[in-house]
Image (cartoon, rainbow, N blue to C red):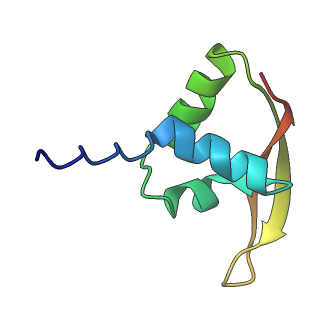
Amino acid sequence: MTPAPKPKPPTQKQRVLQLLRSRERVTVRDIFQLGINSPTARISELRKDGYHIAHQDVTAPNQFGVNVEHREYWLVETK
Protein backbone atom coordinates (compact mmCIF):
# COMPACT_ATOMS: atom_id res chain seq x y z
CA MET A 1 0.00 0.00 0.00
CA THR A 2 1.32 3.43 -0.94
CA PRO A 3 1.20 6.08 1.79
CA ALA A 4 -0.99 9.08 1.08
CA PRO A 5 0.96 12.12 -0.13
CA LYS A 6 1.57 14.81 2.45
CA PRO A 7 -0.55 17.93 1.97
CA LYS A 8 1.33 20.95 0.70
CA PRO A 9 1.86 23.74 3.24
CA PRO A 10 -0.01 27.00 2.52
CA THR A 11 1.75 29.47 0.27
CA GLN A 12 2.91 32.82 1.60
CA LYS A 13 -0.04 34.53 -0.08
CA GLN A 14 -2.43 32.05 1.52
CA ARG A 15 -0.89 32.69 4.95
CA VAL A 16 -1.20 36.47 4.55
CA LEU A 17 -4.79 36.15 3.38
CA GLN A 18 -5.62 33.92 6.34
CA LEU A 19 -4.08 36.49 8.71
CA LEU A 20 -6.05 39.33 7.09
CA ARG A 21 -9.26 37.31 7.47
CA SER A 22 -8.54 36.51 11.12
CA ARG A 23 -7.79 40.04 12.37
CA GLU A 24 -9.32 43.45 12.03
CA ARG A 25 -5.96 45.02 11.05
CA VAL A 26 -2.44 43.70 10.50
CA THR A 27 0.99 45.29 10.21
CA VAL A 28 4.11 44.34 8.31
CA ARG A 29 5.52 43.13 11.62
CA ASP A 30 2.57 40.74 12.01
CA ILE A 31 3.29 39.34 8.55
CA PHE A 32 7.02 39.02 9.31
CA GLN A 33 6.06 36.77 12.23
CA LEU A 34 4.66 34.31 9.69
CA GLY A 35 8.18 33.93 8.29
CA ILE A 36 7.44 36.10 5.26
CA ASN A 37 10.30 38.44 4.40
CA SER A 38 8.50 40.46 1.69
CA PRO A 39 5.12 41.34 3.21
CA THR A 40 4.38 44.26 0.89
CA ALA A 41 5.02 42.03 -2.14
CA ARG A 42 2.48 39.48 -0.87
CA ILE A 43 -0.06 42.27 -0.24
CA SER A 44 0.53 43.54 -3.78
CA GLU A 45 0.02 40.04 -5.22
CA LEU A 46 -3.25 39.62 -3.32
CA ARG A 47 -4.44 42.97 -4.66
CA LYS A 48 -3.58 41.84 -8.20
CA ASP A 49 -5.61 38.68 -7.51
CA GLY A 50 -8.64 40.88 -6.86
CA TYR A 51 -8.67 41.24 -3.07
CA HIS A 52 -9.50 44.74 -1.84
CA ILE A 53 -6.91 45.45 0.86
CA ALA A 54 -6.97 48.93 2.34
CA HIS A 55 -4.19 50.56 4.35
CA GLN A 56 -3.58 53.46 6.69
CA ASP A 57 -0.35 54.98 7.97
CA VAL A 58 -0.36 55.16 11.77
CA THR A 59 2.07 56.88 14.15
CA ALA A 60 2.70 55.18 17.48
CA PRO A 61 5.56 54.91 19.99
CA ASN A 62 7.97 52.03 19.54
CA GLN A 63 9.58 50.03 22.37
CA PHE A 64 11.93 52.97 23.04
CA GLY A 65 9.15 55.54 23.29
CA VAL A 66 10.01 57.14 19.93
CA ASN A 67 7.06 57.88 17.65
CA VAL A 68 7.38 55.91 14.43
CA GLU A 69 5.09 55.53 11.46
CA HIS A 70 3.89 52.14 10.31
CA ARG A 71 1.22 50.90 7.94
CA GLU A 72 -1.83 48.89 8.91
CA TYR A 73 -3.67 46.73 6.37
CA TRP A 74 -7.16 45.25 6.43
CA LEU A 75 -9.30 43.22 4.09
CA VAL A 76 -12.28 45.26 2.90
CA GLU A 77 -14.01 42.53 0.94
CA THR A 78 -13.17 39.06 -0.22
CA LYS A 79 -12.95 37.88 -3.75
- Measuring from the top left, give residue 30's x and y in whole percent: 62, 61
Residue, far bottom: 64
Residue at horizontal 76 percent and vertical 55 percent from the top: 22
Instruction: From the viewer's side, name the closer residue of 76 and 60.
Output: 76
38 w.r.t. 23: above or below: above
Mark count: 0
Q: Is residue 71 visible?
A: no
User: Along the line of sight, which residue is nearer the eye, 61 or 74?
Assistant: 74
Is 34 situated left or right of 73 in this image?
left
Q: Is residue 10 left or right of residue 7?
A: right
Quadrant in the rendering for residue 79: top right
Name the image quarter holding residue 29: bottom right
> Residue 72: where, in percent of width, then height?
78, 50
Q: Is residue 63 left or right of residue 10?
A: right
- The residue located at (56%, 23%) in the rendering is 45
| Residue under the image location 24 percent in, 46 percent down | 4
Horizontal side of 68 relative to 77 (left or right) equals left
Horizontal and vertical percent position of residue 73:
77, 44
- x 63%, y 26%: residue: 46
